[in-house]
Each structure stands twice: as C-alpha cells, then as structure tokens.
Image: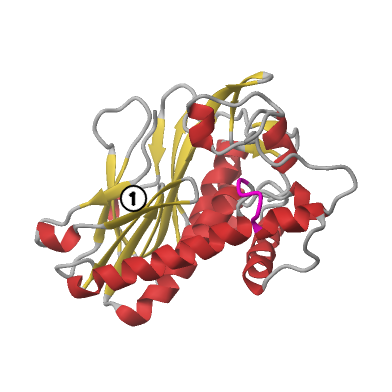
Amino acid sequence: MARPARLEHPSEAPASVLMPVRFAAMGTTVSVIVHPVDQAEACGERLRTWFEQVESAASRFRPESELNRLATGAQAEPSPLLAALLRKSLAVALRSGGLVTPFVRPALESFGYDVSFDQIAGSRPAAGSPGSGLRRPQGDTAWAEVDFGGTGKGWAVDEGLRRLAPHCDGAFIDAGGDIGVFGPAPGGGPWWIDVDAPGRDDPPLRAALRGGGIATSSVLRRAWIGPAGPAHHLIDPRSQRPAQSDVVQATAWARSTLWAEVATKALVIGGRGMAPEIRTWLPEVVLATTTRDGAFEPDPAFREEVLTCAT
C-alpha cells in the first residue's frame, strides 16, 4: 500500500515539541503540530471542532448530514459552510475543465463505495442492507450527485490553518496525506516532509516546506473489490469509472492544500500528459508521479528548493 507524505522531525527541534495532537475525522486520522507547544491542546481542540463541523455538513456517510438532508429534499438551503465548500468545488471543476468534479457520487456508489472505507476494508454489508449507505432516491435534488472527497479534505485543512494562525507561530496539519503548513517549524527551519513511492521501502525524496500544501493521490490506496470487480475511489468523470491512466500515484505541492490535492487528482485521472495543463492554472505547482511501470519522476524543485509562499 502506498503511504502518503508525512512529517520528518527536524533534527534541531526537541521531540517533545513535535508530539502531534491526533483525532479521527473524515475517514482518516488528522494530526496537528503547533508551536509554541503550550498552544497545542487548545489548537488541537479548535481543529477537532472545525473538522466535526465540516463532516456534519458535508459527509455522505452520515444519514443526518446536511448534504444528505439536501439530497433527499429534507433541507431546502445549504448553510454558509456548505455553500462555501460547494462554491470552491465548482471553481475547481471549472479550472480543471471538469476533470476534478464533485458530481461523482452515483459512480462511486455503483462501484461499491456506498459505505465508509473502513467498512469496505472490513466486513462489507450487502448492498441494500442496513448501514450500506444512503442510496439516491428518485426525484431528489442535484445534491444527491455530490461527493466532496479529497477536495473537501484539502479545503478543510486550508481553513483549519487559517483558524489556527492567530493562536500560534507555526502549524502543521496532516489529514490522511493532505498536508498544510504555515510559518516556520519548531527550531526555525522548514517543515520536512518525506514523500513515499509505491514499492519502495525508503522515501525517495524529502520536501522542505515553509508554506502551502502537499498532497498525494493514489489508485493503490482506497481500492477494493466491488460489484463490477477491482475498483478505487478516483473516478474519471469522462467515463464515470475508476481512472485508468498511466499514473498510479501523484504528489504535488501548491500554494494551498486544496490545489495540491486537485493537481494530484488531475494527474492520476488524466495521466502524465496533464502536467503541462496543470501548470497553466497552477504555475507554482511542483509534481512527482509514479507510473504503472514503476518509474518515479519528481520535479527537480522537490530536491533543490525550500518550497515557500506568502502566508
């Protein structure tokens, strides 16, 4: 299984400063490190509250979520939080030419992703049984087509950093491989992130971040055997099927975690040939891909530069 990018402890920072606060949210483990360390508990609670708000609004796996109430017509208008996430997701779809879109829920469900992934990985309920997910009823709203997926997670990380910024000098958030940072790491240097590649025991590169976000998308994670055979969670909207490009995993750095996530998803769905187009709408982006033949191809900037942006 491919592992996402992760924090590498800077040698100049004491280990006690780097003990993360962790909690479960959005189908993954969220980790946060802040300094000064006396703000860690309070910032961790702020972030936990924020992710709970996002999940309560936007999860398709919670029958009582706002998204599902809108999908069934039980709620007429979205909250400001959900409306903001939808606007951002539509902006992503527009800029990516529709390649990264939230309107993939029916396809995901048709391939068996109608429950949270831990249920798929464990003992999966039979289709239509209690707990098998909220199926789309006839005649409901366009909200029933929506799955925010990685776009929602990247957006939550960016907004989480914005909420922590007034309370600390620097912060690192990792939401299942969607990573965002601001400010210096403890000790004053960059945040060091190891970037893994499929089939390699040791990370092939280490990125130094002073701002922005880094994300990894892979067809080798969140993969399962569904009703139609092997499947994964990255849907190609052109075919409404799991993507089958020449890229099996992609990592990207961009000025925000959201756009790093979008770049990786566009690469995995569209293949290596998408890289020049991605650079037209994200000129700062730094990419690394692993192809189906096992070739790992990182941009030189991952090795040669400290990636930074205005905070």
Q: Position of residue 170 (x, y in %)?
A: 28, 72
Q: Residue furthest front?
A: 130
Examine the structure image and report whether residue 195 is included in the region drawn in magenta.
no
Which residue occupies 10% across, 56% down?
A: 11
Which residue occupies 77% across, 63% down?
A: 75
Q: Tell me the residue that label 1 is attached to.
A: 302
Look at the image and tell me whether residue 259 can be seen: no
Q: Nearer the viewer, residue 277 or 24?
A: 24
Q: Position of residue 94 (x, y in %)?
A: 72, 58
For the residue labelled by badge 1, is the local secondary structure a helix, a strand or a loop? Answer: helix
Q: Is residue 238 rendered to the left or right of residue 37?
A: right
Count the labels in the image: 1
Look at the image and tell me whether residue 172 can be seen: yes
Q: Which quarter of the figure is the N terminus placed in? A: top left
Q: Nearer the viewer, residue 288 or 184?
A: 184
Q: Residue furthest bottom?
A: 166
Magenta stretch secondary structure, dominant: loop
Query: Could you tell me the amino acid type at mark 1?
Result: Phe
Q: Position of residue 275 (x, y in %)?
A: 55, 45
Q: Position of residue 3 (x, y in %)?
A: 36, 36
Q: Residue furthest right?
A: 139
Question: How is the structure coloured here?
Answer: secondary structure
Which residue occupies 73% across, 57% down?
A: 69
Q: Quadrant of residue 212?
A: bottom left
Which residues lie in the magenta part? 61-65
Q: Nearer the viewer, residue 159 or 263?
A: 159
Which residue occupies 47% across, 56% down?
A: 285
